[in-house]
Amino acid sequence: MPYFDAASTAPLHPVAREALLAALDEGWADPARLYREGRRARLLLDAAREAAADAVGCRPDELTFTPSGTHAVHSGIFGVLAARRRVGRRLVHSAVEHSAVLHAAEVHAAAGGTVTEVPVDRTGRVAQAAVAGALGGDAALVCLQSANHEVGTEQPVEEVATDCREAGVPLLVDAAQSVPWGPVPGAWSVLAASAHKWGGPPGVGLLVVRKGTRFAPQGPLDERESGRSPGFGNLPAVVASAAALRALRAAAESGPDEAARLRGLVDRIRTRVPELVPDVEVVGDPARRLPHLVTFSCLYVDGEALLHELDRAGFSVSSGSSCTSSTLAPSHVLRAMGVLSEGNVRVSLPYGTEAADVERFLTVLPEAVRSVRERFGVPVEEPARRVAAVPAEAGAEAAPPGVVVDALGRRCPVPVIELAKVIGRVPVGGTVTVLSDDAAARQDIPAWCAMREQEYVGEEPAERGAAYVVRRRV
């Protein structure tokens, strides 16, 4: 069964499995102790730290092992902010950061700090100039992921790091998605990563604080990990994580370029999906992106239903659609990009993915989408395109300008489907108002208008939910 969700967590690397089993026998003792078993455990810990530091591109004494990548992000943010309290209390981050950064920003704001969110373009990329413009005054820390976890877009980390250094503001890089593919370039100050993203066991994170960066660990401290991650760590998992990372680096340097091979497979998906499935928006930067990840959204499709269809066909993928989330809110990444969120699918290929599995996915996907659309009553011939070709459906009276569609209480993709069904019966220049209390409608209706070359007039208040006004242009 093909597993296509490596961006969430990668399968355990074979080298990590071997190292984990060996370390369970050899590395169970406390590495802080001076007796034989403790010394042996200490040697394993030091070797793991050196291997991880070499792969990341830092000094071993700058690297701390933490219980998770999220823990590393939180420790890094609050450690820098505490150390720079006299300079300022403003945290700067992009609009598409991982939730670990956003949650830390919320806590910081609740404690009296301030937060500046830098917007992104439709590819999910921040502008270097926009970050530079936020560096003045009381800026204490900038957070910028090296590559986005949902759409794969790479950020201009090296350029931003240069601007931050010139401004005297530290840069924390969330490198969880990019570390498996190589060191993060640039003069960043702090870096966080998570071992389960590269085939290590879950429960291991990396926090790197470069020399010269002011840092004040928060919370009760002890003597372990330079006081930055207290408690007895999971040494076997640390050893296995470092072994997996070292194996990936060795393979990249000595063998065929796996990143290039996976990039070719992803290019195949990016090209073929819009050809095979009507009304698909492939999102993210087409060139400056992670090699193994592609995300696309399908009009008139419930994301949860599509994931279930693909799961039944043997494919494990992820989604940023609101209908796959208990919060009922669409992905903050897709929302910040202003792209379609309904029917969203994220494919992230693990190392060793076979081309035949990708081809089978491309064979299965069209039928899965067709099945979900049929379940929602979407005609086989897509509604918006069909009604745009004629002024009205056969035998139907033309709807007057100012049509109101009541989609209250109905979740995505229903509001957009109902909009598409009536837009062709409205005269050019007429409007359709969609009443909806679904959070995704605020994002998906404007995105539909952009895909259909219709005019999104705007959002108006309503007794329940909101009223989204669309004017027919074609």
Image (cartoon, rainbow, N blue to C red):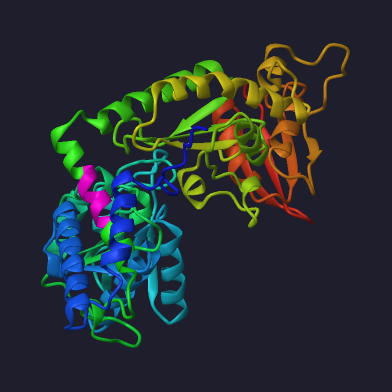
Judge left or right: residue 346 versus residue 16. right
Task: Provide the residue span drawn in magenta.
Answer: 241-248
State left or right for residue 32 relative to residue 327: left
Can you see residue 173? no
Residue 425 versus residue 191 in the image, above or below: above
The quarter of the picture where the C terminus appears is top right
Residue at 34% across, 51% down: 17
Viewer-nearest residue: 368 or 333: 368
Q: In this orientation, which residue lies closer to the viewer: 441 or 137?
A: 441
Tell me residue 84's x, y (percent): 24, 79
Say if residue 327 shows up in the picture: yes
Q: Position of residue 121 (x, y in %)?
A: 39, 42
The percent position of residue 5, horizontal first and vertical second, equals 46, 41
Residue 366 picture quarter: top right
Left/right of residue 243 with respect to residue 398 in the rendered view: left
Picture layout, residue 328 above or below residue 387: below
Q: Is residue 329 magenta?
A: no
What residue sits 16% from the left and 72% below the top? 213
Residue 329 in percent (x, y) is at: 61, 53
